[in-house]
Amino acid sequence: MERYFQEEIECMNRDKLKELQNERFLKQVQNVWDNVPYYKKKMKDAGLTPSDIKSLDDLHKLPFLTKDDLRETYPYGLFARPIKDCVRIHSTSGTTGRRVVAGYTQHDIDLWNDCTARALVAAGATKDDVVQVCYGYGLFTGGAGLDGGSHKVGCLTIPMSSGNTSRQLQFMTDLGSTIICCTPSYAAYLAESIHEAGIRDKIKLKAGIFGAEAWSEGMRETIEDMLGIKAHDIYGLTELSGPGVSYECNAQEGMHINEDHFIAEIIDPDTLEPLPMGSKGELVFTSITKEAFPLLRYRTKDICILNDEPCSCGRTHIRMSKPMGRSDDMLIIKGVNVFPSQIESVLIEKGYQPNYQIVVDRVKNSDTCEVKVEMPSDKFTGELTRLNRMEKELSDAIKNMLGIRVKVRLVAPRSIERSEGKAKRVIDNRKI
Amino acid sequence: MNTISQVSAFIENRPGMLREILSILSEEGINLRALNVAENEDYGILRIIPDNIEKTMKVLKSNEYLVSEIQVCAIEVPDEPGGLENLLGLLAADGVDIQYMYSVFAFKEGKAYMIISAKDVVIMSRSIEKNNITTADKETLGIN
Ligand SMILES: [Zn+2]
């Protein structure tokens, strides 16, 4: 039988849920207007006052917030509560520019912990479980988020933090961990280490909650097979709270968004217009219960699809797909939306390293696309025909994924220019 | 059938790439007995028979080239009109599927040598034995 952490909310009738959202939303708009001068100015510039926002139907009128706004207002410019009411800071490790800091009141932390507790219970957690949290603890939200949820459920919590694999494995076997929380790549690494150490039969794991980075269905299968567990996805952003904005139930068909706290929209990243349910576009969130750091219409830059069909688990909250890419990275080639991450997933599936570069150009009014792929040394046999076959195989697989034919060209290892250690992914030579 | 080691290296089709790899080898004092380039519009594969296999592999790997080593065969070709044609006819009759061939730089006592690579080495080896075709050993080609 399906178990819930807060059944009355998780399975709430949709009309009632909408009523709850509406009430919280209007309160939040007033809260932001009263306490966040930066956003108040944005609203004024758009010719809005709180009286123009009469219900959730007016959500689309509000201005967006982006990471640039968060950097500009660093550190306290978007806080809606004075420091005396705040108890915690978390921060994201931005790859460029200034870090982003988010503040929490004790109430914010309580609600966030409810969210991760829902995710844990959906993965099967009870008071009898031993939860090993190997997300990093500290400024990163992963450790604190799952740790708090685990306490709420009443699980025995092991605050391992990340790294030190031999100690992770020792505690996992000695203490009999039943649920593990970490990044999917670390889960895969732990699974390999467990097999190498030959201690598979000493492991009592039954489920895992894996998030904070992109992972494929193939990777899920590998982790589930190697560890004999059910692997659940979890989604979140420090800007909104942390992990637990949405999470996967046993159906594993999308992540239920905690809609009593977060309102999701999908917009067209080019026109910024809201798109109907089921469309692919950029995910935008409005946090309706956050006190210290309430964001209205925050553009996540994650591209995904929402699904409001009823779920077999009984939860009524809508589901979101795994993020399929970043709107920053989206390319339109021959009229088709292309994300570098899609090409990357093909490469990984075919046994290549994700060292590639997409070169787009326009020849005689028609787009051309070439994907350069660094050849792994173990695939080089010295036969030209084999290289041609490898290119054709990759090109076919990419056509299957994207629906358009691209030219694949194998290049020498480390020949693609790097910036800050990462290969430069896209070169767009089109002059439009 | 005698076999000798061939090194294949991946080279991008940019000006100076071939020269670069050859100068790395000559700086290390490596001599080439045979050389061939197979290419398409984007890149090529350089195939060489060096006088010192181990050193060649080490030097190219340390310069981050993609390399692989395989065994090929150097057949002796009578230095006369129709010499090669005759040999190829013998191999074809036995069903040997030749992937590529190229010639060795040096002559010896009126003989020429061709490096030859077949899809199925066993079939080629049988045909060579059967037809008493001479294959060069390392010493003949001046390989250490
Ligand atoms: Zn569900």
Image: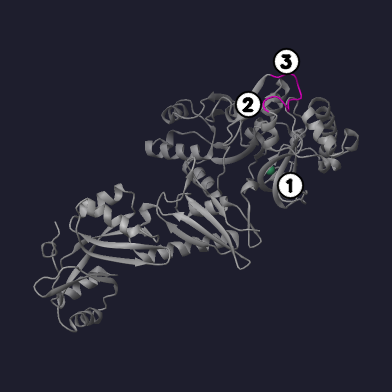
Rounded to the nearest whole Å, what is the CA distance between mark 1 and mark 3? 36 Å
Element type at mark 2: strand
Which residue range is magenta in the image? A74-86
The answer to the question of whether label 2 and label 3 lie on touching residues, with beta carbons closer than 8 A, is: no
Q: Are marks 2 and 1 on the same chain?
A: yes
The answer to the question of whether label 1 and label 3 lie on touching residues, with beta carbons closer than 8 A, is: no
Give the residue at mark 2.
Answer: A90
Q: In front: A142, or A375? A: A375
N-terminal of the pair, mark 1 or mark 3, is 3
Element type at mark 1: strand
Give the residue at mark 3.
Answer: A84
Q: Are marks 1 and 3 on the same chain?
A: yes
Give the residue at mark 1.
Answer: A266
- Left or right for A206, reference A377: right
What is the number of callouts on the image?
Answer: 3
N-terminal of the pair, mark 2 or mark 3, is 3
- Left or right for A110, reference B75: right
Q: Main secondary structure of the magenta part?
A: loop
Residue A405 higher or lower than B93, as above or below: above
Q: Position of residue A374 (x, y in %)?
A: 43, 53
N-terminal of the pair, mark 2 or mark 1, is 2
Look at the image and tell me whether residue A124 can be seen.
yes
Amino acid type assigned to the residue bearing label 1 in the image: Ile
Q: Position of residue A55 (x, y in %)?
A: 87, 38
User: What colouring style does the render use?
Assistant: one colour
